[in-house]
Image: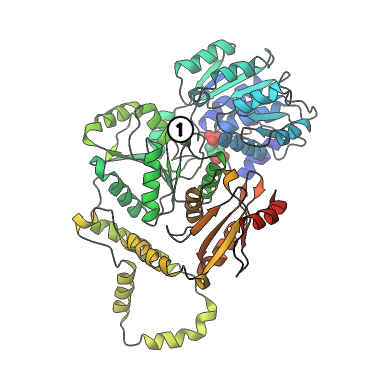
Amino acid sequence: MTTFKSLGLNTELLKAVEKLGFESPTEVQEKVIPILLEQDTDLVALAQTGTGKTAAFGFPMLQRIDAKQRMTQGLILAPTRELCLQITNEMGIYGQALKNVNIVAIYGGANIQEQANKIKRGAQIVVATPGRLKDMIRRRLVDISAIQYCVLDEADEMLNMGFYEDIKDILTHTPKSKSSWLFSATMPPEVSTIAKKFMNKPIEITVGTKNSSAKNIDHQYFTVAARERYSALRAVVSMNTDLFGVVFCRTKIETQKVAEKLIQDGYKAAAIHGDLSQNQRDIVMQSFRKKRIQLLIATDVAARGIDVDDLTHVINYQLPDEIETYTHRSGRTGRAGKLGTSIIFVTKSDRRKIKLIENKLQTKLKELQMPSPEEVLTSKITHWVDQVKNIPIKSDLHNHLPQAISAFEEISKETLIEMMLSKEFKSFDLQPKALEFGRDDRSSDRRSDRRSDRKINAPQDKDRFFINVGARDQYEWTTLKDFLRSFLKLGPDDVFQVEVMKNFSFFSTHKDHRDLVLKSFDDLIMDDRKVNVELTKKGKTFSPKKNFKKKKSKFN
Ligand code: AMP
């Protein structure tokens, strides 16, 4: 078996490998690391995200740079801020045992001066998005004239996003003698052009993505009528209670509609699309990573750079036009040796695309039948039983146990369970027509939530909170309300009376949620600013001007 040691990694990097628990190199690492460690060569590697490619270029770069020199020696270009931060983070972990190595991320949407200061302190490796790097080169805030290694990561995505001119411009500021390492999931003509134009006889490496995707990903499809897509999605989510995944839609509007419906039906979902500001995007992604959100509803463009390793499912709400895009989507699950499922909802007229995908992946896609309401219910009961069995015992209730036991003495265990089941699934409709997978216990709970919400408008029952985010963070009351209720995992109407000011906002919840609200924002950072939520003082009527001044001095 090939080991990282046999690939030629030094002791410091091997320590990181051990700490990370990487047992053996992945295919791309096995092929690429020895070449990049031993040869001063250009290289083109066809490898998807999730194959371990960051370590494939990261380990050799970390091993080859001279930590005693403070000047920038390695440059990594990536298409999105998200990916840029992720690479910086991974490289930091890989290089943790190396002394005096600084890796700095530069990307748009954050303070340029802070990034420039970090570079000034010495950054042997710079990880950058093309737009911000170009800007910083122009302002002479970064010097890449002496780099020895240049990585173009996810080159196809960078070109898709229109960075060709920026990349061309950036490369003119780098020395000819450097080694260029290009990584791309696909090889469209534009990427070949870059390789031909800017690289010198690159060694070409292909990683068997076809096989690995067939091996780790279970591709399944359901044939549905277009109007049944949402019901089908609900059925799939209901049947897979541990599902943690991304649902791909074709348009922004569709992502929003699907997310909205899922939230209304009681699921933890959020949409991510091009209309969100970078801050809002970051917050959604943070919630998703922490699994406060179970389902991320995304367009293909917005999903670029999303890199979450343990997705159990990728769901194609609609199929994309390009089969290549399907490969990208499904490749987001089944990563790092784990198993994943890619589900497609396909209409009869689109079924020919299934054949095309099968040809492309050289694997058979499984056709599944939609579960019956009975099957959905069986699965939900199994999950509920598991949850009940795992409820932690609260020891301070122990003394009250005899009282409760004697109160239930008359009722058999069977009847008691039946009563609990009836409460839990009181509105689950077993009529196929009525159910259509579109209605179950959760939605009725939401309805009752709404009824109770009306009652809590009484001042004594509600709490009013201050939060230091506002219009400057591109929030309006509707988007802030959406964010708060999905972040706090509350129902559609549990957050109300949202008022957005320039630098801060106010919102109300039922006082039962007070602890949840006060504790939930503890570790939330937005644009390098800690998100702060406070209870407003009781009895005081809200005066925007007064509060604005008070808070402004504190938070700006
Ligand atoms: P990447 O393709 O670089 O985005 O890597 C995907 C994930 O695989 C990352 O979370 C890595 O930490 C992980 N990974 C990279 N190399 C290995 C390896 N040899 N064994 C296990 N996991 C790995």
Residue at (52, 75) in percent of width and height:
394
* Image coordinates for residue 108, horizontal then vertical, percent: 62, 32
Q: Is residue 329 left or right of residue 132?
A: left
Total of numbered circles in the picture? 1
Residue occupied by mark 1:
301
Q: Mark 1: give few (<14), some (14-19) or many (20+) Cα within 10 Å.
A: some
**The quadrant where residue 68 appears:** top right
Camera-nearest residue between 184 and 345: 345
Which amino acid type is shown beneath numbered disc 1? Val
Up-down relation of residue 274 to residue 404 (above or below):
above
**The quadrant where residue 61 appears:** top right
- Badge 1 marks a residue whose secondary structure is helix
* Image coordinates for residue 201, horizontal then vertical, percent: 57, 11
Up-down relation of residue 52 to residue 537 (above or below):
above
Residue at (48, 56) in percent of width and height:
485
Q: Is residue 242 left or right of residue 118?
A: left
Up-down relation of residue 412 to residue 161 (above or below):
below
Question: Does mark 1 have its CB less than 8 Å from ligand 1?
Answer: no
| Quarter, ligand 1 | top right
Camera-nearest residue between 276 and 415: 276
* Image coordinates for residue 131, horizontal then vertical, percent: 60, 26
Q: Is residue 541 left or right of residue 375?
A: right
Residue at (25, 45) in percent of width and height:
228
Camera-nearest residue between 110 and 295: 110
State how the image is colored: rainbow
